[in-house]
Amino acid sequence: MKLSIALLASLGGVGAFVPSRTSSVARPHHPPADASSGGIGTTTSLNQFGTLGFDTNNLYSREEVETMRTQNEIIGFLEETQRPNTALRSDLGTTVLISGFDPTDPSSTEILDFLNSEDSPHFPFSRIIAHCEDVKVARKRLIGRNARYTGLLDKLTFSEGASSPIPSAEQLAGVSSWVAHVGGGDIARVADVADAAEGAESVKNVAILVSGATGVGGDALRGIEEMLKSKATTFAYTLLVVPEWNDEPEALCAFGIVNATDVGGSPFVTGETFSREESLRIITECLALDRAAGKCVVANAAKDANSLENMLIHGMREIGFSRIQEIEYMVTMGAKGYSDAIAAEKTDTAWEKVPDETEEEKAAKARTKEEQILLNRQKRKEAEKQEELKAMAMEWAKREYLRKHLKRHIPIKEEEFIEVIWDRAMFEADLKYRTMQGQAVSESEERKKFKENQEKKKAEAYKMEQERWKKMQIDELEPKEIKGIRLGR
Ligand SMILES: *[C@@H]1O[C@H](CO)[C@@H](O)[C@H](O)[C@H]1NC(C)=O
């Protein structure tokens, strides 16, 4: 899924790139690279007035310039090195079981939506088993009116979990993948999941989500990771730990991922929350991601626009990473991976270049990098425009076919018609596109020109055809000679 600019704008990190809502002064989206000389100057002069009615200190503050520079650097890094080549697990199987989801909580329908989504062809499941305490309630709650249309009705079955929230070995028979939710930060329960999975031969992949883990400490987390490492021999696992859930939709807020091994005293602060839907999205994608196997991670919301996590997510969404690509990057690399890569790059170049780069050289390098990013961005925009144009042209051509077809039957199939009329369709689409964009269009003039061009093309094609015909006649008149040449070789 591609995120629209509008959606991007709601992401905290973009705040610095769109005209601020509180400021009435339109800010250019990207200040010059060497804003330290040019951009800052503007600030100083504006600051001299002091009473513009809003916080003038925020216009091109040094930090803001720094943030934008970092953001550009991140986009450059992602574009150059991080086009992910997402590898999916090949042994997800056809049967997935979900456990620990309360059917009266939105999380239970959300997890089913993710596992049964048309947009997620990487989930090959033809059977989804919901392990629930009260199957009657679950059936009533989870089979909604649209279950038939979404295909869920054909896939969903239930297993009775009145005696235990963890399915028994019999209940796990035939299950290949398992998404286990452990609520209330009760991470000790993760061991029960591991035991059950280890005891079930068919289970190959287990994704475990612990929510409400605000009070969990770093040591306890590492203990769980060690436990999983030692217990899991017949299945691959991913553990995701999040604080109390909130109701925010997925993909709204940026998020950060930290390895359990890198968590300090405690991974969360008091009162910290995380989007329920986002945590479900992350854990389901992790189930499918090959490189997420064996990972024990913690997720935090990254609301701060200046945080590396926020800038990374913003950068990936701007470049057009899909959600699964974004999650793969965050879970396997994260902000730490980015910092490590940048640090490595810096020491590398320091070793290579014995004489220090001059300021001019640095500036020139930064400029070419920025230019490259700009160029890539333009290329992406152009590609998107072409796609849009083609779609519009197709629409125009189809409508035209229908119109002509209704008027009088034309003895030609829609496909052929579209092929014949394609140039014209693209011309019409381009005209409409530019009109929609508010660009000046002189329609009659352009139509005239287009017609003339078409005539010219037709004439040329006719001439070419004539010549080809002439040659063919000559060739056909001397077939023997040709044969003779071939034999002579
Ligand atoms: C987890 O640790 C590995 C190994 O140190 C590191 O490469 C990776 O960037 C870390 N992942 C995250 C999400 O911090």
Image (cartoon, grey):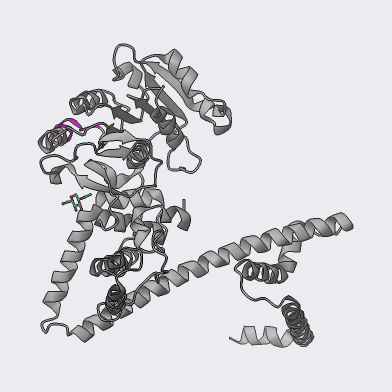
Residue 393 placement (x, y as % from top left) = 67, 64
Where, quadrant-wise, is the C terminus in this rendering? bottom right
The reply, left or right, for residue 214 in relation to residue 489 is left
Determine the main secondary structure of the stretch shown in magenta.
Answer: helix
As drawn, 361 above or below 427: below
Q: Dividing the picture into quarters, in which one does residue 26 lie?
A: bottom left
Residue 275 placement (x, y as % from top left) = 34, 39
Residue drawn at 69 percent across, 58 percent down:
395
The reply, left or right, for residue 186 in relation to residue 84 is left
As drawn, 124 above or below 411: above
As drawn, 127 above or below 71: above
Residue 230 falls within the magenta-colored stretch:
yes
As drawn, 466 above or below 230: below
Residue 91 placement (x, y as % from top left) = 35, 38
Of residues 83 and 255, which is closer to you in this image?
Answer: 255
Residue drawn at 46 percent across, 58 percent down:
5
Q: Can I make out residue 259 in this image?
A: yes
Please provide the residue range marked out in magenta: 227-234
Of residues 116 and 300, which is closer to you in this image?
Answer: 300
Of residues 120 and 436, which is closer to you in this image?
Answer: 436
Of residues 173 and 429, which is closer to you in this image?
Answer: 429
